[in-house]
């Protein structure tokens, strides 16, 4: 039993390290991608998408080195974590989550081989979503081995936060397409795009990530407007669903902390998204918006896990009362 407790502590520490490294990877990746796109440049928006025209790369070599070092260290820790989860006997569900996390890391490593070509949409799109996956799985691994969690205990699904997380993932995927297609300047107003509230059907082709782009879309581009509006509608749905879930969580002691973090990050993310557009797509606001999205996803996962734990406690309490009554 003491040996098992030591392994669980090691897994928790490794999972926290992997979560921190995942955020560092997202920061470095987002900074490189957005700075190369021209966000925050002095002659905005003329320099937007400058990498597509073979222009200079404004990002520093230090950030590129940070990205490679953190990615390599994460991959190494991923192998170590899986080994700890599997030997001498597998610890579930930690071993399953660690396997998925390592598989995602290896997949992103191979995708990185195609990321040097900025004209391809799909590598950037998958890299952005992969970064969110790294945060999600790393946190899920930590939560799976907490001492106050009983994986085999029954629990009811937390439907409201789960629905909010689905809306958040959809909003993130659409945001990833906006970034991968260099479509930020297609809609430089909020909440509508130059008075347009509903996307045109002619822009549906922008949802296809398996294309190449020769230049950044112009303001008012139908595909870019569609991506922006769908992104905002999904973001509003996530705001309402997760906001309601967070508000309800405040009434229960077991989920109160998770609910507070969720509500705080919702306000910050919504504010960063609006300010990014109003500011003319400031580089650091855009970076903050991307990182906060990952933090918001982590907070939503934490709330779902806390809701499960509360459900287990309620189920246990009911069973104990029934036992004493009998």
Image: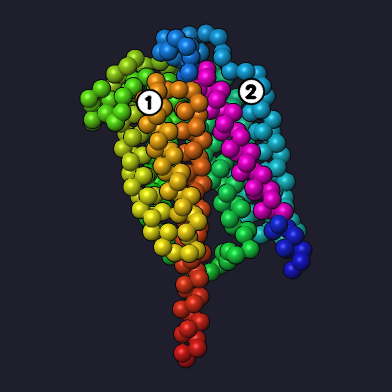
Res 277 → quadrant? top left
The residue that appears at 50% across and 26% down in the rendered structure is: 284
Mark 1 and 2 residues: CB-CB less than 8 Å, in contact?
no
How far across and down, in percent of the image, does residue 313 sit? 50, 71
As rendered, which of 151 and 274 lies closer to the eye? 274
How far across and down, in percent of the image, does residue 136 sit? 54, 45
- Residue highlighted by disc 2: 64
Task: Provide the secondary structure element on which disc 2 rests.
Answer: helix
From the image, which quarter does the N terminus lie in?
Answer: bottom right
How far across and down, in percent of the image, does residue 325 sit? 46, 90
- Residue highlighted by disc 1: 277
Task: Provide the secondary structure element on which disc 1 rests.
Answer: helix
How far across and down, in percent of the image, does residue 321 sit? 47, 83
- Residue span colored magenta: 10-37
Res 26 → quadrant? top right
Res 179 → quadrant? top left
């Amino acid at each position: 039993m003491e040996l098992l407790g030591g392994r669980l502590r090691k897994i928790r520490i490794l999972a926290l390290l992997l979560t921190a490294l995942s955020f560092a990877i997202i920061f470095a990746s987002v900074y490189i991608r957005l700075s190369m796109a021209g966000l925050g440049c002095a002659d905005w928006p003329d320099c937007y998408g400058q990498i597509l025209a073979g222009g200079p790369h404004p990002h520093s070599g230090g950030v590129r080195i940070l990205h490679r070092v953190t990615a390599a260290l994460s991959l190494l820790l991923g192998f170590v974590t899986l080994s700890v989860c599997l030997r001498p006997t597998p610890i579930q569900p930690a071993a399953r989550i660690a396997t998925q996390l390592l598989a995602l890391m290896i997949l992103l490593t191979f995708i990185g081989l195609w990321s040097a070509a900025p004209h391809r949409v799909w590598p950037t799109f998958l890299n952005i979503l992969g970064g969110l996956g790294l945060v999600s799985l790393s946190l899920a691994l930590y939560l799976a081995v907490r001492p106050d969690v009983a994986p085999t205990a029954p629990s009811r699904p937390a439907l409201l936060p789960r629905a909010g997380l689905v809306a958040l993932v959809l909003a993130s995927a659409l945001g990833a397409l906006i970034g991968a297609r260099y479509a930020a300047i297609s809609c430089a107003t909020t909440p509508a795009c130059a008075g347009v509230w509903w996307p045109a059907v002619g822009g549906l082709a922008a949802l296809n990530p398996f294309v190449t782009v020769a230049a950044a879309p112009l303001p008012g581009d139908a595909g870019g407007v569609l991506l922006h509006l769908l992104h905002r509608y999904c973001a509003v749905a996530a705001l309402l669903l997760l906001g309601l879930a967070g508000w309800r969580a405040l009434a229960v002691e077991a989920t109160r902390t998770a609910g507070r973090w969720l509500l705080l990050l919702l306000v910050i993310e919504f504010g960063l998204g609006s300010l990014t557009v109003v500011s003319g797509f400031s580089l650091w606001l855009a970076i903050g918006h991307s990182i906060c999205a990952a933090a918001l996803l982590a907070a939503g996962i934490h709330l779902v896990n806390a809701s499960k734990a509360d459900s287990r406690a309620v189920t246990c309490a009911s069973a104990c009362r029934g036992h004493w009554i009998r």
